[in-house]
């Protein structure tokens, strides 16, 4: 039948962190035949198949419905998918691969700080040179819509495959649109970001295709994957706090004010409290338990918190389930 196909980066910046992410969720990616094989599996999950693709190919595969899930940058989703709202569903941001898509101009353009300034320059440029301002980028679609939203029409795109930041110095364009994380490449090329020139704040996301064939088997695979991912995400936000108090009912009421909740069926020991507490409220929770008679409060880090209601699966099922 049709398995759940998950596309993950086969190379580049997002590859290693994607493997780490799946590893944290207890999902071991198997690549039989080594790095050259572009189909793989996840250990113990027969309903899932892995496709190894480049980050930009993943965005296109999601658009075509050739894969069910993909890990890729939000920049590539918006650049390569015409109507992302109708074509894909963002399952969850993954917290790695941060980068901004920005409009950058030469630092020497001291009068140009905003998109409005750029708009003036674009018109002037055309009047003076008879040709249009050139923007070097590989983000052709993002650039067109961002410039249109700023009412800029007097420009032309010079498609750039790499080393985009070098274009102004090389004389092949006046300005650029590109992705930046540390800013060091822009700096090294004497370019500055316009103050309102951040087009998109990107990071790696787990994305679902709404065009894929969501068979029952694929949905079963998705549920299995998202159970583990949601459980790992949930575990990152909480700690397990334990103590022996004078009166459990009263202690639970006290710590509920900082968001700490008893999650387990009551143990026989009427004085034993064991709560899941939001990470930033742990110290407050401990103080409250000490005030309720505890001598010692212990705090544990958890690997997983599984719940009956899966916050990641439910919204997906609503969109693709029959
Ligand atoms: N500093 C950065 N520079 C470029 N990309 C970054 C940066 N930080 C995170 N990324 C993310 O990594 C993606 C690029 O990854 P990678 O270079 O592997 O793919 P690619 O260039 O699309 O591959 P190909 O062009 O060969 O298909 C970006 O689109 C972005 O989402
Ligand atoms: O703001 P920074 O931290 O300097 O990072 C941004 C730079 O990194 C990327 O290039 P990459 O190294 O992927 O080379 P590429 O041009 O071949 O994609 C990107 O295209 C920028 O040039
Ligand atoms: Mg690259």
Image (tube, rainbow, N blue to C red):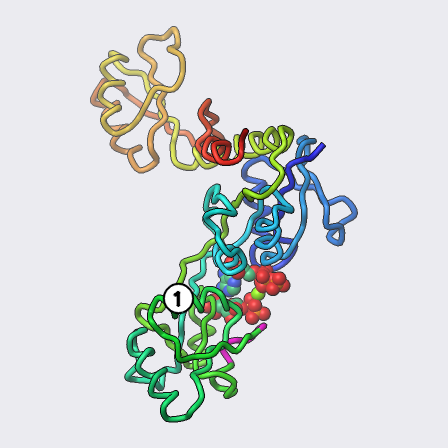
The outermost residue toward the bottom is 128
**Residue 162 is inside the magenta segment:** yes
Give the left or right position of residue 217, taking residue 116 as reference. right
Q: Residue at x 31, y 23 (%)?
A: 296
Residue found 44% across the figure and 68% down from its top: 143
* Quadrant, the N terminus: top right
Q: Is residue 303 visible?
A: no
**Mark 1, secondary structure of its residue:** helix
Viewer-side residue, 304 vs 78: 78
Q: Which residues are magenta?
A: 161-166
For mark 1, what is the residue? 146
Exactly how many numbered labels are in the figure?
Answer: 1
Q: Would you say residue 251 sits in the magenta stretch?
A: no
Percent position (x, y) of residue 131?
Answer: 44, 88
Position of 18 with respect to 311 (left or right) is: right
Query: Which image quadrant: the C terminus?
Result: top right
Residue drawn 25% across and 24% down? Answer: 255
Q: Which residue, as the protein is rendered here, is positioned at the far top?
A: 268
């Amino acid at each position: 039948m049709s398995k759940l196909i998950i596309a993950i980066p086969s190379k580049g910046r997002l590859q290693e962190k994607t493997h780490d992410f799946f590893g944290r969720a207890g999902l071991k990616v198997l690549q039989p035949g080594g790095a050259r094989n572009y189909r793989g599996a996840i250990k113990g999950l027969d309903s899932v198949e892995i496709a190894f693709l480049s980050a930009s190919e993943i965005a296109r595969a999601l658009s075509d419905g050739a894969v069910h899930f993909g890990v890729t940058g939000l920049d590539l989703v918006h650049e390569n998918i015409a109507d992302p709202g109708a074509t894909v569903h963002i399952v969850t941001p993954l917290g790695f691969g941060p980068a901004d898509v920005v409009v950058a101009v030469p630092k020497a353009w001291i009068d140009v700080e905003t998109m409005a300034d750029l708009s003036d320059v674009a018109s002037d440029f055309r009047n003076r040179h008879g040709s249009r301002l050139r923007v070097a980028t590989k983000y052709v679609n993002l650039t067109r819509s961002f410039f249109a939203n700023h009412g800029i029409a007097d420009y032309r795109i010079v498609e750039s495959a790499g080393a985009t930041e070098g274009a102004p110095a090389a004389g092949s364009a006046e300005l650029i649109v590109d992705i930046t994380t540390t800013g060091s490449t822009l700096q090294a090329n004497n370019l500055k970001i316009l103050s309102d020139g951040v087009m998109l704040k990107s990071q790696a996301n787990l994305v679902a295709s709404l065009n894929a064939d969501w068979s029952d088997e694929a949905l079963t695979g998705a549920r299995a994957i998202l159970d583990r991912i949601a459980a790992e995400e949930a575990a990152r936000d909480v700690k397990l706090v334990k103590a022996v108090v004078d009166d459990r009912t009263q202690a639970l009421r006290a710590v509920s004010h900082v968001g700490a909740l008893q999650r387990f069926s009551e143990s026989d020991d009427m004085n034993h409290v064991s709560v899941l507490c939001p990470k930033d409220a742990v110290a407050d929770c401990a103080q409250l338990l000490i005030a309720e008679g505890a001598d010692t409060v212990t705090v544990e880090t958890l690997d997983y918190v599984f719940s009956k209601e899966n916050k990641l699966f439910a919204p997906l099922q609503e969109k693709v389930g029959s």
